[in-house]
Image (cartoon, rainbow, N blue to C red):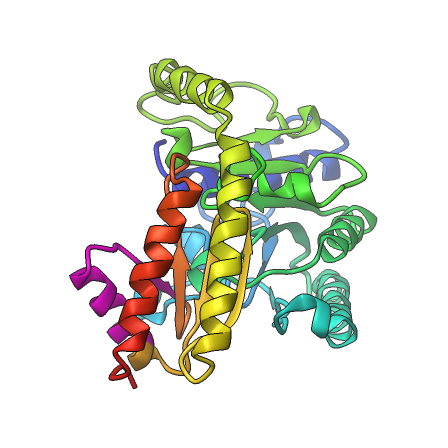
Amino acid sequence: MACGTCANENAYKAVFIWYRTKQRGGSMPSKEDLESCMRDMPPGSPKLSILSFQGGFHGRTLGCLATSHSKPIQKVDIPSLVWPVAPFPQLRYPLELYAEENRREEERCLDAVWKIIVESKTTGQPVAGIVVEPIQAEGGDHHASNTFFRRLQRIAKDNDAAMIVDEVQTGVGLTGRMWAHEHWGLEEPPDFVTFAKKMLIGGYYYKDEFRPQGGYRIINTWVGDPAKLVLLEAVIRVIEEDRLLDNMRETGDVLLEGLRTLENKYPDVLDGSRGQGSFCAVDCPTEAVRNKLIYALRNKGVQAGGCGERTIRCRPALIFQPHHAEMFLDIFNGVLAQGNIR
């Protein structure tokens, strides 16, 4: 269990176990449950689902692929679970200029989530959990407001579904908080927070009621690989001692302001600058333009990445400082000034 896919896959399993345990009134699986699951039949293998969002990415194993909707090449030819998918807000930037338009867009998506959950109960495949990223990273750095996520949590709770916050990419400081969901001001913590990458190990935090009864319900060869926690302790200590969360907020201010300046200077090439902390991105008019810019930056010594259909994303290390951001922006300006990108 070392990757984000592992973290999400096991979180899904914990959600299903919790949901069925509640349906049984808290009792352990029956003889019928144990026998039928060996034939992949109900009630032991129940018809339950995880609701995900268009543009989301949660991993590449079979269960996680059913909730991933960002890259067709990673799904094609592979059988999938038919689970419900809701629209994720497609906001316009800068947010302050499109507040009312964005509010209506988020309302549309939340209404769709509610409708999908209600319909799932009538079709015999209830939604046991909702999985969502604080920022849809692979899908194109799509953001939503704090209000959106607070209301999503309320919808999940009102419909007896668990809320899984996938922090595999957004977690551990890049947004200026240890966890991106800390920005939301939730009424209570999420039911699950999954993590990997900078945590050095794949896993999830969860509320006590989601702990499966008995042993061997969720297990792997390395039993969680607890030796990695020794390394993680060192990582956390450096983050705290070197005030790296503060650094991400300060660097992010420089980075995002610089991207907006470049967007204003080159409006035919850049658009939609956005970010939280140093988790920043900017759009290009086409995928081809985006790829040319990434290639040109690489030739100037800058490692940049793409996401979504036409987005350049910034994923600096926690030690990336304001003067590093200024160096990047200066190189980016030089590439754009060449004028032969389109």
| 291 in the magenta segment | yes
Quadrant location of the C terminus in the rendered image: bottom left
User: In the image, residue 338 lies at what x, y percent?
Assistant: 25, 78
Depth check, front residue: 108 or 123: 108
86 relative position to 309: left or right = right
Look at the picture and state if 178 lies above or below 45: above
Depth check, front residue: 208 or 170: 170
Residue 35 appears in the figure: no
Which residue of the protein is positioned furthest toward the left in this rendering? 299
Look at the picture and state if 250 lies above or below 290: above
Quadrant location of the N terminus in the rendered image: top left
User: In the image, residue 99 lies at what x, y percent?
Assistant: 75, 70
User: In the image, residue 83 lies at what x, y percent?
Assistant: 55, 62
Residue at (45%, 16%) from the top-left corner? 237
Look at the picture and state if 197 lies above or below 128: above
Residue segment shown in magenta: 290-307
Look at the picture and state if 317 lies above or below 29: below
